[in-house]
Image (cartoon, rainbow, N blue to C red):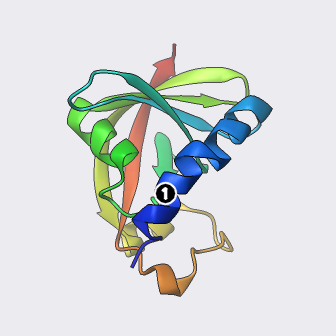
Amino acid sequence: MPMPRWWARMNKWSFNPSELKKGKRPVIIHRGRTSGREYQTPLDAHAVAGGYLFLPLYGANSDWVRNTLAAGAARLRIDGAELLLTAPRLIDEDEAFALLPDGTPRPPAWLRLEQYLLTDCDART
């Protein structure tokens, strides 16, 4: 079971704003599926050949995951640059960790994450 939704809601109002102010963590910039509003979500982004891999700690039903999949694209602010992410798709754990270098820490088993978000990286925007 991914992290509980109540924890995600709490982070949306406490952790996320403080991390955005610090400006050190990668940030995925995505549009709301119905509102069209732009959202910024700080998270961990793992560079892989041709794109980025994201571990959705709150599960594949997280708003940022669903928004990115629905739009077919998002932007990633990382290391002072913005990158265009395209072709988002969900992959399973075996496929995800085959893309990462050996020794990359896995999320705790109790999270039981089954799907990961993989994107291609088009170009710097």
Above/below status of 28 relative to 89: above
Residue 68 shows in the view: yes
Q: Nearer the viewer, residue 108 or 106?
A: 108
State the residue at coordinates (26%, 41%): 69
State the residue at coordinates (21%, 37%): 70
Element type at marker 1? helix
| Side of 46 relative to 115 (left or right) | right
| Residue 120 coordinates in the image, percent (x, y) | 40, 37
Other-residue count near label 1 (Cα within 10 Å), few / some / many at <14 / 14–19 / ≥20: some
| Residue 47 coordinates in the image, percent (x, y) | 58, 46
| Residue 43 coordinates in the image, percent (x, y) | 59, 48
Amino acid at circle 1: Ala
Q: Say which residue label 1 marks.
A: 8
Above/below status of 48 relative to 33: below
Q: Nearer the viewer, residue 84 or 100?
A: 84
| Side of 67 relative to 39 (left or right) | left
Choose top left, top right, bottom left or bottom right for residue 60: bottom left
Choose top left, top right, bottom left or bottom right for residue 21: top right
Residue 47 shows in the view: no
Q: Residue lying farthest top?
A: 125
Q: How many marks?
A: 1
Above/below status of 103 relative to 52: below
State the residue at coordinates (72%, 23%): 80
State the residue at coordinates (48%, 79%): 111
| Side of 114 relative to 8 (left or right) | left
| Residue 85 coordinates in the image, percent (x, y) | 42, 31
Q: Nearer the viewer, residue 1 or 115?
A: 1
Q: Nearer the viewer, residue 31 or 101?
A: 31
Q: Quadrant of the N terminus?
A: bottom left
